[in-house]
Image (tube, rainbow, N blue to C red):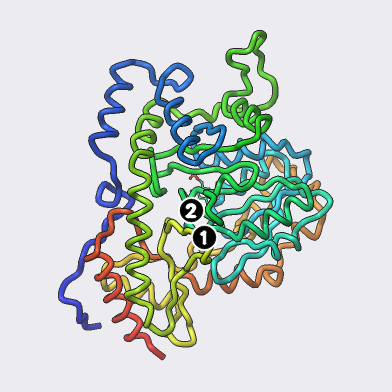
Amino acid sequence: MKLKTEKKLKLPSDQDISGRTFGEEELKAIEEVIRSGVLITTKGRYGKMLEEAFAKKLGVKYAYACSSGSAAVHAALAAINPEPGDEIVTTPITDMGAITPIIYQGAIPVFADVCPKTLNVTAETIEKALSERTRAIIVTHLFGNPCEMEDILKLAESRKIPIIEDCAQAFLAQFNGRYVGTIGAVGTFSFQQGKHMSCGEGGIVVTNDDSLARRIYLFINKAWGYGDPNPDHYFLALNYRMSELQAAVAFAQLGKLDECVKKRIEMAQLLDSMIADIDGVSSYKPKPNAVMTYWKYCLRVDDKKIRGGATGLAKALKDYDIFSIPRYIQKPAYKCRIFQEKITFGNSSYPFNLARSEVIDYNDEKFKGAIEGLSQVLVLPFNERYEKPHIQYLAISIREAVESLRL
Ligand SMILES: *Cc1c(COP(=O)(O)O)cnc(C)c1O
């Protein structure tokens, strides 16, 4: 294929420094930690500073740092403390790290379908997945686009079921003027390499609830009652702490979060405007009462208008050195072996052996929104280091690639 664009542009990547904001602030903080010789957050100052600053930024009472976004979800669930066989309603379109903690806590993930346009769960799809045994609902604000929390909150409150908001992809996203992560009972975040702010690996859990906060803190700390008059290991828990080195980097990154989010929104909106007239592709847009913070910039590709749909377009974009991901996670979570074959603890298949048979009957018919949405989505590479020329390059490349594939 002959390219009309003059020359290829290398896009910043979140997998290396070109697409990240690590710099002097992080180096200075790390140096201070190393020189102090205190690398553990139970004794150092950065872990506490990170937690206080993160809580303040979101306007919540408590924030507890931990070792990953998966650990954050695990701590949130362990705080809610489901009984073995209890059901946790969640989405089949998310990172597996948000799902496996449910199984580790002896509970059953029950998948709600998603809206094909956003790949987010909705009150309607959640309601169909609820039962007498539902102990919590986990919503994922996918790609930084908030779920419709008003309806979801109403439903959850009417059934007295706590909501965990997985905000790993949605730092500072808002719904009705409230930050996601502060709307439900607990919010969880990840600081993994590719997230809005990063320290390589890491996570944080936020809540306003005193008793959940206490259990979250304990779960991250082997349930050891630091500072109590008669401390003990109160219940089954792991060491999910982050180190002072990670906390120092995350603290410096938090100082750059506003700018990061502002830049991502600005550039995403610019790209929206530059590709708005291209027939056959549309972008993911937030509802008018929501602020989307664009972990990734996604397209919906119409395979009736564009040859090969999202997969075809991804292939064509490779000629421009634009490496996009059709189908995001390739397949809904329930199609993975862990669910298909119930591979868990030894040969027990626990906790699935406690599940109601209909919730482990993973039939595609029940997930039409997920199947349709995944077939259409194209995840473009994106981060806060994109500047106007990168966006222009993306827009021109998408336009040319689409025209070359037009049916
Ligand atoms: C990244 C991510 C996680 C897991 O975070 P880790 O830090 O990789 O464990 C969980 N949920 C979502 C939605 C994510 O994007």
Q: Residue 296, image x and y in percent? A: 41, 60
Element at label 2:
loop
Residue at the (48%, 53%) spot, across then down = 173
Element at label 1:
strand
Asked if one can make out residue 202 in the rendered structure from this viewpoint, the answer is yes
Circle 2: residue type: Ala
Location of residue 372 with respect to 54 vertically, above or below = below
Q: Tell me the quadrant of the picture where the N terminus can be found.
A: bottom left
Residue most extreme to the right: 132
| In the displayed structure image, the side of residue 118 where residue 234 appears, left or right | right
Image quadrant in which you'd find residue 3 = bottom left
Asked if one can make out residue 349 in the rendered structure from this viewpoint, the answer is no
Q: Tell me the quadrant of the picture where the C terminus can be found.
A: bottom left
Q: Residue 405, image x and y in percent? A: 36, 85
Q: Residues within 10 Å of mark 2 (few under 14, many from 20)?
A: many
Which residue is label 1 attached to?
A: 290
Image quadrant in which you'd find residue 5 = bottom left
Residue at the (42%, 27%) spot, across then down = 49
Location of residue 10 with respect to 231 vertically, above or below = below
Location of residue 220 with respect to 171 vertically, above or below = above
Image quadrant in which you'd find residue 305 = bottom left
Mark 1 or 2, nearer chain start: 2
Q: Residue 382, image x and y in percent? A: 35, 59
Circle 1: residue type: Ala
Q: Residue 251, image x and y in percent? A: 38, 33
**Cβ atoms at labels 1 and 2 below 8 Å apart:** yes
Which residue is label 2 attached to?
A: 173
Residue at the (48%, 83%) spot, across then down = 303
- CA gap, disc 1 to disc 2? 7 Å
